Image (spheres, grey):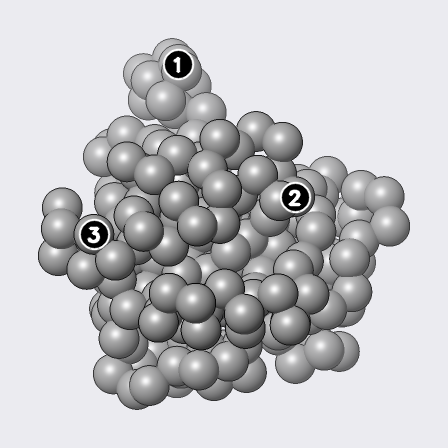
């Protein structure tokens, strides 16, 4: 299965201009088998996700992109919406208690504005980021950052032994599928997703329509 694990819709993400139906049409066009809807600090109701998936014949997985004091973190397998801005450590405790997974989203997006030269961050500096001690993985392919940023994130994940995932971070239909993850197993719910990610039974690749 090919799944874009990071998308936003107008339902709960004011920054998005993409309705759920627009998302699903774009996902089909991109050759995806499913999407992970990760609204900002909000999670879809399971019945709404199931209905959307049945309507379009695609798998819809529910997650969140949670704002923390150490940056944005994608979570799957946790139903509890955050109350205020948590630290990465506090969020990790909630995720672990729920049997979920936490992944630092676009961990080096600042380079998009300033460039590596201006920030002068070394691999050693990046590894010392305390947020990375409280996540299971890093998003190493994000459709809204530069190739250099994604490559740097992948290098950090490899050195630290963290999981590597990808997602388009789409806020509009044309961006859906820019980054996606190919799973070896059939993924029908969030627990199966968490299990597959933790076992590494997946690889990052662009959608077929890209």
Q: Residue at x 61, y 55 (%)?
A: 64
Q: Which residue is identified by label 2?
A: 12
Q: Residue at x 79, y 48 (%)?
A: 86
Q: Earlier in the sequence, mark 1 or mark 2?
A: 2
Q: Is residue 137 visible?
A: no
Residue 6 position, x and y percent, is 44, 51
Residue mark closest to the camera, 1 vs 2 = 2
Q: CA distance from mark 3 to mark 1?
A: 34 Å
Mark 1 crowdedness (10 Å alpha carbons): few <14, some 14-19, many ≥20: few
Q: Secondary structure at mark 3?
A: helix
Q: Secondary structure at mark 2?
A: loop
Q: Is residue 176 left or right of residue 128?
A: left
Label number found at residue 114:
1
Q: CA distance from mark 2 to mark 3?
A: 23 Å
Q: Which residue is identified by label 3?
A: 29
Query: Which one is in front, 82 or 46?
Result: 46
């Amino acid at each position: 299965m090919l799944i874009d694990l990071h998308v936003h819709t107008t339902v709960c993400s004011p920054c998005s201009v993409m309705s759920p139906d627009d998302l699903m049409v774009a996902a089909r066009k991109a050759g995806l088998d499913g999407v992970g809807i990760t609204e900002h600090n909000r999670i879809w109701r399971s019945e709404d996700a199931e209905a959307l998936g049945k309507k379009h014949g695609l798998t819809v997985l529910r997650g969140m992109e949670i704002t923390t004091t150490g940056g944005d973190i994608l979570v799957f397998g946790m139903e509890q919406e955050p109350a205020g801005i948590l630290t990465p450590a506090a969020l990790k405790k909630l995720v672990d208690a729920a049997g979920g997974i936490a992944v630092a989203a676009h961990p080096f997006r600042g380079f998009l504005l300033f460039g590596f030269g201006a920030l002068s961050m070394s691999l050693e500096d990046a590894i010392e980021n305390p947020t990375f001690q409280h996540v299971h993985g890093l998003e190493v392919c994000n459709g809204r950052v530069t190739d250099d940023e994604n490559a740097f994130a992948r290098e950090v994940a490899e050195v630290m032994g963290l999981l590597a995932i990808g997602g388009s971070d789409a806020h509009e239909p044309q961006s859906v599928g820019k980054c996606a993850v190919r799973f070896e197993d059939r993924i029908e719910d969030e627990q199966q997703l968490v299990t597959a990610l933790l076992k590494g039974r997946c690889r990052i690749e662009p959608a077929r329509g890209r």
